[in-house]
Each structure stands twice: as C-alpha cells, then as structure tokens.
Amino acid sequence: MTEEVRMGTETPVIKASLQIAFAIGILLVGGALDPQLILAQGEGRGPDGGNLKLLEFVRIDVTKKENNDRYSIDFVANAPKIPVGTKIDFLLTWRSQLVQTFSVTVPANRKISDSLLVKKLEPSPDKYMFRSVIDPKKQTSKVVKELEKKKELFPPAAAPWTEFHFDHQFVIGTAEEIEASLKETRDWFVGRYSKLAKRDLEVRDGVKSIEAGTDYTKPNGDFDEKKWRGFMDKKVISEIVEMQEEIKKSFQDPRFLAHRLALSYLLELSVAVGKRTTNESKKLYTSKGLSPSPLDTKPEKLEVKVRSGRRVPRGSDLNDLVLKINKLIGLDPEENESQS
C-alpha cells in the first residue's frame, strides 16, 4: 500500500483507503475467558480433589435504576454448608478483572437474597460473573470456630476460600441498551481515528502545496515558516497531544472496561501519526535548506516513540491499526458505510 492511500472516513479519498481494512471479516470480540482461570474453578478443594460447591446461585437478575442510570444486581443463592453469620465477599469480575466488591452475611436460613447497586457501567455484550471469597480474617470469633469444625470444607491451607461461578454468567443492560452503547463507543473511536487521518493527510498535502508554491508561502514564493508553525503547533501537535492524554485517561473510565485493547491500538495510532507528521515537517525544513524546528525534532508533550523503532510508520501500518480497532469494536463494512 503506497503513502497515497489514506486512512479514516473524513473525505472520499481517506474513506477509500479503509475499504481494504473494512472488507476483511470483522468479528466482535466476545467475553472469552482465560483458560487458566477456567481450570482454577473449585480449586480442587473437595476431599477427593474434585470441585467443591459451597454456594449455589438460584437466580441473578440485572435491572436499571431509572433515577440514577445505575444497574442493580438482584440475586438469590443457597449456602447450606456455610456457617450462619459468615461474611462472604462477592467480587464482580469481567474477564478476571475486578470491577467491584460487595459483602454479604449468611442469614439464619442460609438463603442469601440481596440487591447490589453497581457503580456506573456501560451496557456491554460481554458477560460478567461473581467470584465468592470467604476470608477467615473478616469473620467473627464465633464464625471462625464453626469454620474450624469443618476442615474438610474449609482446609486452613486453602484460606481464603474462593469459588468461581462460571455457570452463572450474565450481561449488564438490555439488548437495546447494549446496542446503543456499542454505537456510541464505535462513534467515539471512529471520530478520533478519523481526526488523526485528517491531520495526517493535511500535513502531507501542506508539504506538497509548499513545494508547489501554492500555500504556506510568502508573496515572493518563499516558505512562510510562521504560518506553517501556526498550523503544525496549534492544529496538529497540540491536537494529537490532547487526544493522547484523553486516551490514557480513558483506560481508567468504566465505560471502556471492555475496550481497553482497542484503546491501546488507538493510542499506538496517535503515536504513529505524531511520528509521521513531525517527520514530514522535518523533511520540509531540510528540503528548504533549513535546520529542522526543535518543535518537530523534540516535541515537548507529544509521544512519538513508535514500536517500529526509528522507522517512520507507513500508511499500511496506520490502516492495520484501524482494522484492529474496528475488529475489537465490532464495526463491519456496512456500518462503516453508514457512518461515512
């Protein structure tokens, strides 16, 4: 793929460059679980080394609270083997990532029924699950004595006692809410990589216009460095710096819990565009017999250290990153057409 092929969706020319990327089969990455984590289920804590069930979910329902847009997980679980008064930590997890921890105490009838208010999360097609943990350090002295009487169920060497409830996974959000959230997320990613594409294109076209003497030049035809720096510093570098900071902050945003890998590729894309644009500017200065501007050679806040080392990313590198992002956010060719 030559440098004339541009990425993004801002113009027909840029849009055309992504047709190859989008034409390849795009699959929505689902909630695949870590195989090693699956093997840990039950941890072989039974007397014969098999799985040991201490807690059995009967029902898990997820509903949205209209007053604050947060979700509530209502569940019922039986705990016939666990002493009354035992404090159980329920760890809400997504692909082994801890999202939130809730604590519940086993009642007299050993039937736990509770409603857990989840922190603000975006609806997602990826499934969540609970991991239950009984930590002896968090129990009353009475409960500890009861646990000590059941060493076959609660062997001291295995404490804290953990169960992975893979057989009761669930999604957060209705089908309509999940689709609306996915659309918003896709628009967010497309908007940002399209903006990067636009800046990459503008820099290259700007250099060509200077060479042709049609733009960024003084009346006498000389290179107008002041006008060029106004474009590079205020419209290109500062904008990419701002985007890089936004992407880094998004890693901590619960909204992007299921899209952190896509964020990584978007950050890598911003670095690649930062490298390409400043390199084009440096080449421009050299072609004019000038020393490159330090704003290009050593940009203060702009991250330009690319994976390829000293090699400047090619257009095909950018398109590959866009393809990876689209695959992760489930954007197929038809959806791309509708957004362009």
Image (cartoon, rainbow, N blue to C red):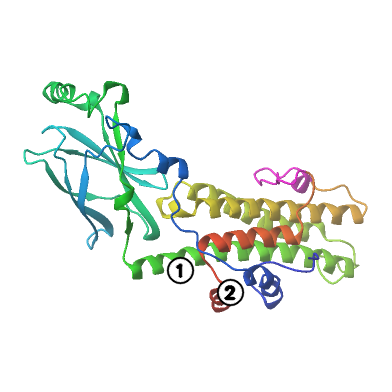
Q: CA distance from mark 2 to mark 1?
A: 14 Å
User: What is the secondary structure assignment of the residue under circle 1?
Assistant: helix
| Residue with the mark numbered 2 | 333
Residue farthest left in this picture: 108
Residue at 11% from the left image edge and 23% from the top image edge: 142
Quick check: can you spot residue 217?
no
Along the horizontal axis of the image, is 162 left or right of 86?
right
Residue at 67% from the left image edge and 50% from the top image edge: 271
Q: Mark 1: give few (<14), some (14-19) or many (20+) Cα within 10 Å.
A: some
Residue range highlighted in magenta = 294-309
Residue farthest right in this picture: 289
Amino acid, disc 2: Pro
User: What is the secondary structure assignment of the residue under circle 2?
Assistant: helix
Residue farthest front in this picture: 48
Q: Quadrant of the C terminus?
A: bottom right
Compare residues 184 and 24 and report the one nearer the observer.
Answer: 24
Along the horizontal axis of the image, is 45 left or right of 31?
left
Q: Disc number at residue 183?
A: 1
Quick check: can you spot residue 72?
yes
Residue at 51% from the left image edge and 67% from the top image edge: 187
Magenta span main SS: loop
**Which of the two discs, 2 and 1, labels the residue nearer the N terminus?**
1
Q: Relative to 47, say whether 187 is above or below.
A: below
